[in-house]
Image: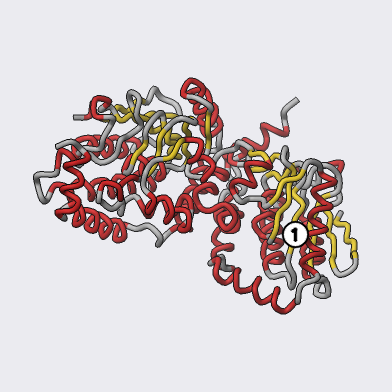
């Protein structure tokens, strides 16, 4: 199961966690989320890791929740969304600095994973965004993290408008911190950011991240995210959403 | 080391140590604070820096000989941030050329920030084992919590143009001289406005922004907690001992 999330740590301060489900554009299934959570737990137990890079295998970073797989089981969407909520909390509270290397599409829950990371990097042509409303569902679990990242005013516009934006637009909006002109130059850009982070004093990095996390509570908490997961799941169960998802997902 | 120039209804305060890129000492910070606190008659304050660079941050060479200097610098900076926020009138900053670390931390306490397009801004201090946490609450007011995370954790610097895009500065100008001139013009424009309405509006916006003495104190202590630790000592020694 752990092959779904590949954790690479060759010693030293940097580890890489890769979503490895390229045939499904790294869509978040129950198994993939479980694998990611177990990898994040291993990183937490490895204090020498100061920087964790999150990336996607293949052309996409993460296409979002794998709702197609859970549409026929009324309880499954809730389980999936609760697991995603826990994963985001675990990533945020990780003492290591997290870097999202958004190599391609980061959609819905996938965009949420990028926004929960401390620092994000992408290229001008990547596609990012929250098209949940277009599918008749509600991006409740990832919304609080987007609000934290770009502020409530801009988050409102992004979440209600739906659709996708380019990497360049996401950078201008402040949703992404670093932008390369194309996919080829993103690797070196990401390496230079990670190198700078890895050269930081580990205590100073951890203390600063802890203070930033401290300043943001109670904006995002386990209770808030659990309610969000319930809300999101209840909307997936509505006939409107089920019809819309079946039509859009081609089932 | 602080030059105070009253000009009509406004007061211009300049960090005046251009040979050291206006690097901050505890004495400069104390003097700056007292200048701000005694500017009750000014209708607007301009905070600027002599020369081509607004402020390169703390003068770390002081910490080599004085074990208390880092704490004094952090406490002094936090005090200036408090004073700028509670100033009786609006504060316009000319952050031309560069606003680095402690220099960048001053921006969050200002009301309107001018910079130069090619200026370098940021917080390259975690690599020295120093936490820039002290400026987190006010930085978040300007750029939001998301961009603040990247700016504080990553030692890389951003340009004045990107600073405007993020909200860290409000306008970018071509040269240091045109930047300071624009900041002065902006302060003069504010000084013409009815002062009571301005003061109440300023206080209201500070009330709404949620930054309190308690949150500033928590942030200061997050930075102070690391002072004197082994990580900071070894990393500062490495710079001092560089040939």
Residue A117 lies, in percent from the top left, at: 42, 42
User: What residue would you read off at disc 1?
Assistant: B92
Say whether residue B202 is left or right of residue A44.
right
Is residue B178 something that shows in the picture? yes
Residue B6 lies in quadrant:
bottom right
Residue sticking out furthest to the top: A184
Depth check: B229 or B167 in front? B167
Is residue B220 something that shows in the picture? no
- Report the residue at 83% width, 42% height from top: B52
Residue B12 lies, in percent from the top left, at: 85, 60
Say whether residue A145 is left or right of residue B73.
left
Q: How is the image coloured?
A: secondary structure
Quarter of the figure with the N terminus of chain B: bottom right
Residue A47 lies, in percent from the top left, at: 40, 37
Q: Secondary structure at mark 1?
A: strand
Residue A70 lies, in percent from the top left, at: 14, 42
Residue sticking out furthest to the left: A73
Quarter of the figure with the C terminus of chain B: top right
Depth check: B82 or A44 in front? B82
Q: Residues within 10 Å of mark 1 (few under 14, many from 20)?
A: many
- Report the residue at 72% width, 46% height from top: B172
Residue sticking out furthest to the bottom: B196
Residue B87 lies in quadrant:
bottom right
Q: Chain of mark 1?
A: B
Q: Is residue A243 above or below residue B35?
A: above
Q: Is residue A158 above or below residue A7?
A: below
Q: Is residue B29 above or below residue B132?
A: below
- Report the residue at 26% width, 46% height from top: A135
- Report the residue at 69% width, 70% height from top: B86
């Amino acid at each position: 199961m752990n092959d779904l999330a590949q954790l690479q740590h060759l010693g030293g301060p940097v580890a890489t966690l890769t979503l490895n489900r390229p045939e499904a554009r790294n869509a978040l299934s129950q198994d993939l989320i479980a694998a990611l959570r177990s990898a994040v737990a291993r990183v937490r137990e490895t204090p020498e890791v100061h920087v964790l890079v999150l990336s996607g295998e293949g052309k996409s970073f993460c296409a979002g929740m794998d709702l197609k797989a859970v549409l026929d089981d009324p309880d499954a969407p809730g389980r999936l969304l609760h697991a995603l909520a826990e994963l985001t909390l675990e990533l945020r509270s990780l003492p290591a600095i997290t870097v999202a290397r958004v190599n391609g599409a980061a959609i819905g829950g996938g965009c949420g994973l990028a926004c929960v990371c401390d620092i994000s990097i992408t290229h001008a042509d990547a596609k990012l965004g929250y098209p949940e409303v277009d599918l008749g569902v509600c991006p409740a679990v990832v919304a609080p993290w987007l609000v934290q990242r770009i502020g409530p005013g801009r988050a409102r516009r992004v979440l209600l408008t739906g659709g996708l934006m380019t990497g360049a637009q996401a950078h201008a909006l402040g949703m992404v911190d670093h932008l390369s002109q194309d996919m080829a130059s993103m690797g070196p850009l990401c390496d230079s950011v990670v190198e700078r982070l890895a050269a930081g004093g580990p205590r100073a990095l951890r203390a600063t991240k802890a203070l930033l996390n401290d300043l943001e509570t109670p904006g995002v908490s386990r209770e808030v995210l659990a309610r969000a997961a319930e809300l999101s799941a209840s909307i997936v169960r509505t006939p409107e959403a089920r019809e819309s998802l079946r039509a859009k997902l081609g089932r | 080391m602080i030059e105070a120039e009253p000009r009509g209804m406004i007061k211009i305060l300049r960090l005046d140590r251009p040979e050291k890129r206006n690097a901050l000492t505890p004495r400069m910070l104390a003097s700056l604070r007292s200048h701000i606190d005694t500017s009750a008659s000014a209708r607007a304050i301009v905070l600027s820096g002599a020369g081509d660079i607004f402020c390169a941050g703390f003068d770390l060479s002081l910490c080599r000989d004085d074990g208390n200097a880092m704490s004094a610098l952090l406490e002094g900076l936090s005090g200036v941030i408090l004073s700028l926020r509670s100033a009786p009138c609006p504060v316009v900053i000319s952050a031309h050329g560069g606003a680095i670390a402690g220099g960048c931390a001053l921006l969050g306490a200002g009301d309107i920030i001018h910079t130069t397009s090619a200026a370098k801004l940021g917080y390259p201090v975690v690599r020295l084992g120093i936490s820039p946490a002290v400026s987190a609450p006010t930085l978040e007011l300007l750029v939001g919590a998301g961009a603040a995370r990247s700016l504080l954790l990553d030692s890389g610097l951003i340009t004045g143009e990107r600073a405007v895009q993020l909200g860290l500065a409000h306008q970018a100008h071509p040269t240091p001289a045109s930047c300071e001139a624009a900041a002065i013009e902006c302060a003069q424009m504010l000084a013409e406005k009815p002062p009571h309405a301005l003061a109440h509006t300023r206080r209201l916006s500070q009330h709404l922004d949620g930054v309190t003495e308690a949150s500033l104190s928590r942030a200061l202590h997050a930075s102070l907690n690391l002072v004197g630790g082994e990580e900071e000592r070894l990393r500062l020694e490495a710079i001092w001992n560089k040939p």
